[in-house]
Image: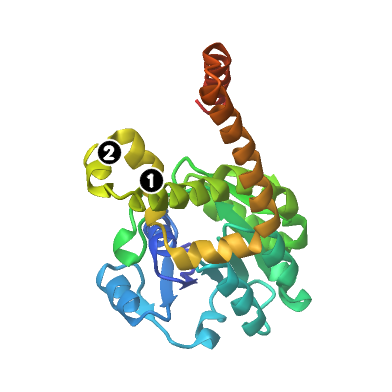
Amino acid sequence: MATATKKIGIIGLGLMGGSLSIALKQTPNEFHFIGLDHNKEHCTQALALGLVDEITERLEEITLCDIIFLTIPVDGIIAISKQIGSLDPKCTVIDLGSTKEKISNAIPKEIRENFVTAHPMTGTEKFGPTAAVPNLYKDKVVVLCDIEKSGKHQQETAKDLFSQIGMKLVFMDAREHDRHAAFISHMPHALSFSLANSVMKQENKESIIALAGGGFKDMSRIAKSSPKMWEDIFRQNQTNLIEAIEAFETELKKCRHMVENEEWNALNAWMDHANTLHDILD
């Protein structure tokens, strides 16, 4: 017996939402995708690319879907959660925001069980529907936060969908997630923006850029990320981000001190210790 086609609403038709649609279309399930985005050009592109089957301008229509993904900036996720109103008890709303504690705590209690707060640890510096790619989510980690606050049906729905698109599930408290994310994601973005600005402020910036090799391009690549999105993330995770930046500043000051004082053996040992990070990551 064929399973009924499920309606999936995607609010935010950019890299994450578009790539999610591509991934879900590769599963055996029958889905009908309805998109909503305040950017009219994104709506037109998403339709043309086949990322969604139809576009709506009405949030009320999205709330009738079986599953709703919120792939918009984190401040927008909180705003939408307060606008949604009542939901069917079986409706599953999954947000993909990069911060979790404020989102988790801001969802109205009447619909808290409908929500699953998730953070897929993936992405690129590109944005918009044309940035959507196959396999953005495959073999990547998705962190499911405060999962005990979600209904049983919603928990199973989210775990099943993420598993079907090839993601590795990790469960974490939202507060713990935000502290870890500050160090491994948010602070590196702050550093990339800082690196880009420091180079651009040089008098002879053209010559510096002409000499830029792969290392510089790797470190500065994420400085092309959306300022609007990252402003919201930095705001929501302000305290943890400051702690992470201070930890980095401490290490950078150590490096400067060793270079200034020609402590080359100590510098070598310091760099050798940094090499061990990849024993964990690789």
Tell me the quarter of the picture where residue 255 sits.
Answer: top right
Q: Residue at x 41, y 49 (%)?
A: 198
Task: Name the secondary structure under disc 2.
Answer: loop
Residue 141 versus residue 106: which sits nearer the camera? 106
On screen, residue 278 above or below 218 = above
Q: Residue furthest top?
A: 265
Q: Residue drawn at (30%, 74%), measured in percent from left and top?
A: 47
C-alpha gap between disc 1 and disc 2 = 10 Å
In the picture, the disc for residue 25 is none
Q: Is residue 124 visible?
A: no
Q: How many marks are shown on the rendered structure? A: 2
Q: Name the foreground residue: 19 vs 214.
A: 214
Q: Is residue 204 left or right of residue 36?
A: left
Q: Residue 212 shows which numbered tag?
A: 2
Tell me which residue sits at (47%, 40%) in the image: 139
Label 1 amino acid?
Ser
Residue in front for this viewpoint, 65 or 279: 279
Q: Residue at x 61, y 56 (%)?
A: 118
Mark 1 crowdedness (10 Å alpha carbons): few <14, some 14-19, many ≥20: some
Contact flag, marks 1 and 2 (Cβ < 8 Å): yes
Mark sitting earlier along the chain (1/2): 2
The secondary element bearing badge 1 is classed as helix
In this image, 108 relative to 4: left or right?
right
Q: Amino acid at mark 2?
A: Ala
- Badge 2 crowding class, 10 Å Cα cut-off, few under 14, some 14 to 19, many 20 or more, is few
Is residue 78 left or right of 8 when viewed as pictured? right
Residue highlighted by disc 1: 220
Q: Is residue 245 visible?
A: yes
